[in-house]
Image (tube, helix red, strand yellow):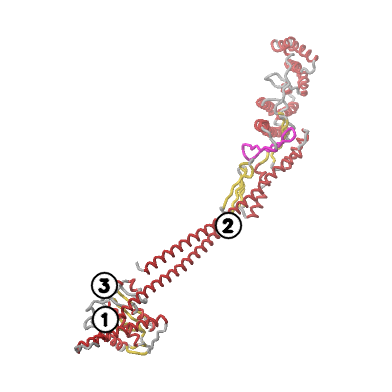
Amino acid sequence: MSTFKLSRLILFIVFSFVVLAAGYGLFYYYSYLCKLKRIDFLEQTQALTAKVSAKVQTAWDKSLENTITHARRLVSGSPEQISKALKIIEASQNDIQRAFYIDNKIIYLPQWRKFRISKAREELDLGISENPEFKRAEFFEYQYNFYQEAVKIYEKFWLSNPDDFQAANALARCWYKSGDFDRAEKIYRQIHLQNPSIQRPGDVPLAVTAAFQLLNIYQSQQNQEQIKEFGYQLYRDLLDEKWELSQVKTDFFKLKTESVLNQYMEDENFAHKFDRLLARGKSLKKIKDYVRFISSRVIPLIESSYIHDYRIFFLASKTAFLLIIPHGEGYIVLDINYVQFVQNNLIGLIKTLAKDHGLGIKLSAGGVVHNFPEVSPGHKTVFSISKNFPDLKLELTLPDASAADMNSYLFKLRNVFFAGYGIFVVVLGFLFFLLIKQIQLAELKSDFVSHVSHELKTPLTSLRMFSEMLNRPLRLPVHKRRQYYEIMNKESIRLSRLIENLMDISRIEKKKTLFYFKTENLNTLLKTASEIFLNSIEKNQHPLRLELHSNVEIDMDKDAILQMILNILDNSKKFSREGDAIYLKSLVQENQVVIIIRDQGIGMSKSEIRKVFKKFYQVKKSYEDKFKGVGLGLAIVKNIVRAHHGSIILESEKGRGTTTRIFLPLKRT
């Protein structure tokens, strides 16, 4: 491997390493900047999310604290004031559906003053029922229908103890059976009004029994006004749960009362009054069901755990929750409309936050979703507002515009890096190209010096050798002397042409080439060139075929054009086989003359054609020993053609020769 080839290889390796190292370094730095930008964007997003979430959580906790404080401030100790305070709480906040107070298993509701969850039953003193005399009265009543005898005994027991309602009830029952409704009514009314809670096991209170007996008496007497008035009051007492009855028995007595009162619905005033009572009954039923739910679900929760500040208890529908607040010896319980509470305490704040920070905020609570405002998809962050409200979630959407700004910045940054790297590669490539050119030029100049030395040495050697032979004292034949003189003449001409070419290429490089233009006949010049060419070769070595156009005159430097033709003919001779003809032709095309020189030599490839006009370039290095030269001929030709404002085209094919076309402008008339 030559020194120049090794230099090119080393230079290529060094430049490749620099390009790859610079590319890796730029890519690493670009990735680092992108990472910093993304981290900054993420930190800004997290900071904004934390700020918004903190404000929302603070507002939510504050709203619960305000509700708790308001309820505690209103509720006082006495049952009357508790009921009034609960009504104020319900009226003052539209998100509170119900407010009640639980104290010692008693629920205080605004609709009812109180509702005892577990009433203590008064045990019946069964001593009177075991009295033989009382049993004898029952025997007279039930076995023999001797009501008068039974009345005497029952009356005796009642008069001796006016609070003995069992004896009073038995006495009234006997008067009723005997048909003395007036006396029976007085006793039953007394029992009903005094409302004793005693009852036999499995039976109903005596006050309820007395009430329905009174209703039967009024029916027997066909006293419609009394039936409507007393029946209405009885139905109302059943609705208000005046007596401790099971739900089944309460419903039974209500239906029985309704069946009696329905007979008098033709009275419009009474019908309207009773319909309102029925509507109240439906409303109270809902309250009773609600109280039963509280009794079965909420009170066991309170009893089984210690509630410090408050406790949240979600109802089955998830659209409401109970806020249980310890207060005194009991608990304030607020039944809050979840969706409405969120609407009142968070929506305004969230709208403001969405507007101020350019965010899309979606709030989910109680199965309801609120969007502020509707935004296109972007970077989303979801978080819970409170651990007590697991379905209360906030989704923040950083609009795509923010992400787009970041992506736009990264895109511009990438373009800047790519452009910078591209410019760096181009500049480096240009430097690489210049250095390669310098190496190639140095290589060509080295070859040139070698070839010139060889080219100069050959004619000088011949001149020296033949001059010495002519200077010998031996007499040489005349033909030998003539032969030696001819050889010396040819070698001197060859040496002169070589020196002239060197001087021409030197002038070309220094841009000091001078041309002297004059109108000349081109055909005359071509004939002169052909004669010089034929005189420089042996006879019939390369036949020259001339085909010239008549009267072709152009403005030209005669010596330069002659040199150009001779250089091309010399190349044709050099690369043609002995005996191959060379064609020299001229013709006129439009406003220019064309000089065509064609040979039948070895030809050139397309890649070689692009290089032959460069200085010091020689075709076919493998033929260097056979085809001597320094690679300047065609470079000089191109310079001469360009100086004459013409052009040159080279056509060649391997093994089929080369055709050179020179286009020169005609003389302007």
> Which quarter of the picture shows residue 60?
top right
Q: Is residue 300 above or below residue 359?
A: above
Which is nearer the eye, 104 or 497?
497
Which is nearer the eye, 554 or 376?
554
Residue 26 locus on image (x, y percent): 50, 61
Which of discs 3 and 2 lies nearer the camera? The answer is 3
> Which quarter of the picture shows residue 429?
bottom left
Q: Amino acid at mark 3?
A: Gly
Residue 3 locus on image (x, y percent): 37, 69
Disc 2 from disc 1: Cα separation:
77 Å
Q: Residue furthest front?
A: 473
Which residue in the protein does label 1 denote?
583
Residue 655 numbered tag: 3
Residue 645 is inside the magenta segment: no
Which of discs 2 and 1 lies nearer the camera? The answer is 1
Say which label, 3 or 2, has the lower sequence index. 2
Range of residues picked out in magenta: 309-334
Residue 349 numbered tag: none
Which residue in the protein does label 2 denote?
401
Name which residue lies at 48% across and 59% down: 24
Q: Is residue 403 left or right of residue 643?
A: right
Residue 316 is inside the magenta segment: yes
